[in-house]
Amino acid sequence: MNVEQARFNMIEQQIRPWEVLDDSVLQLLAVVKREDFVPPAQRALAFVDTEVPLPEGQCMLAPRVEARLLQELKLQRHEKVLEVGAGTGTLLLAALERWPLAEFVATEPARGMLDLAESRVRAARPSESRVAFLEGLADALPVGEGSIDLIISSFVLQLVPDRLAALREAARVIAPNGMVSYVTWLDRDRPFIPAEEFDEAVYDLEIDEPEGTDEPHAGDVRSGRAATDELRRAGFVRASATEGELIYGWTHETYLAYKLAYDERSLMRSLKAPQRKRLENRARERLSRLKERDFRWHAPVVFARALKPVASR
């Protein structure tokens, strides 16, 4: 793979068409080496227009979502930023580059993922001293009340047990007139042929799927209106939300990798190694019969933001 050509194509074919036109953001994404933050098993997906599966059931942002977040957020010179769910550190590294005078806190509930993010950021910026990596849950953030000016979060708030509790915790730690800004999935159940074919592969092998999920989670947001209502209930004002759509151009191999490592991780963990291999082979066989157009996935998302009110005198 020609890495620099792939990076150029990512910017010109994915990011610019999604109304990311800020030259400083585009230049930033040309500098940040996204390929260094992708797990080795998913390295081929570094510049693909998709979320990349990560450990602990998380995913790495698609390039254009990361770019949109960076374009929309404005910071003063010396503000303090907290990222809830740092993942592998790609958004954090881009934020460090974009806002050279800001201070940052990166949180993760899982120590292993936090260590991964820190190691990737330290490797890219060995002398960086403006970021603290802290273990903590979204509804129990390890920072003081009113100590943060901006909270950012990407594809995390659908995974927390109680999204309203997490937003109320955000309101606790944000300073008056500070902002919370997040992006997550919208709850839209649309048919997708490759997903149906994977399910058929499971049925072909008469595999019993595990009931429920590994742990309770809030789930996807119902609508932009639901997102703003929830922000107001958490104590924020001037809440706004924009619904959007990501269009992914999977191949049968990249989609299979996504299903096995992320979307069907509970199922895969419940199977013994021979069963996993048979399911992988059967699913690959079914997916390989589909046409390229069948792998275009329209995934709805919502960008939401709000301010913490200034206390009245």
Image (tube, rainbow, N blue to C red):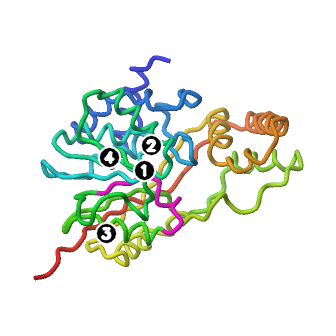
The kind of residue tagged 4 is: Glu
Cα–Cα span, label 4 and label 2 = 31 Å
The CA span between labels 1 and 4 is 34 Å
Q: What's the mark number on residue 189?
A: none
Closer to the observer: label 1 or label 3? 1
Q: Magenta includes 87?
A: no
Question: Which label sits on residue 114?
Answer: 2
Q: What's the residue type where badge 2 is placed? A: Leu
From the viewer's perspective, tell me whether residue 172 is left or right of residue 262: left
Label 2 packing within 10 angstroms: few (<14), some (14-19), many (20+)? many
Residue that numbered label 1 is attached to: 135
Mark 2, secondary structure of its residue = helix
Quarter of the image where one finds residue 15: top left
User: Of callouts 1 and 2, which one flags the residue occurring earlier in the amino acid sequence?
Assistant: 2
Reading the image, the residue beneath label 4 is: 19
Which of discs 1 and 4 lies nearer the camera? The answer is: 1
- The residue that disc 3 covers is 171
Q: Find the magenta span and give its range.
A: 151-162
In this orientation, which residue lies closer to the viewer: 280 or 148?
Answer: 148
Q: Amino acid at mark 1?
A: Glu
Q: Are marks 1 and 2 in contact (CB under 8 Å)?
A: yes
Upstream in the sequence, badge 3 or badge 2? 2
Q: Earlier in the sequence, mark 1 or mark 3?
A: 1
Image height of 47 relative to 233, above or below: above
Cα distance, mark 1 to mark 2? 7 Å
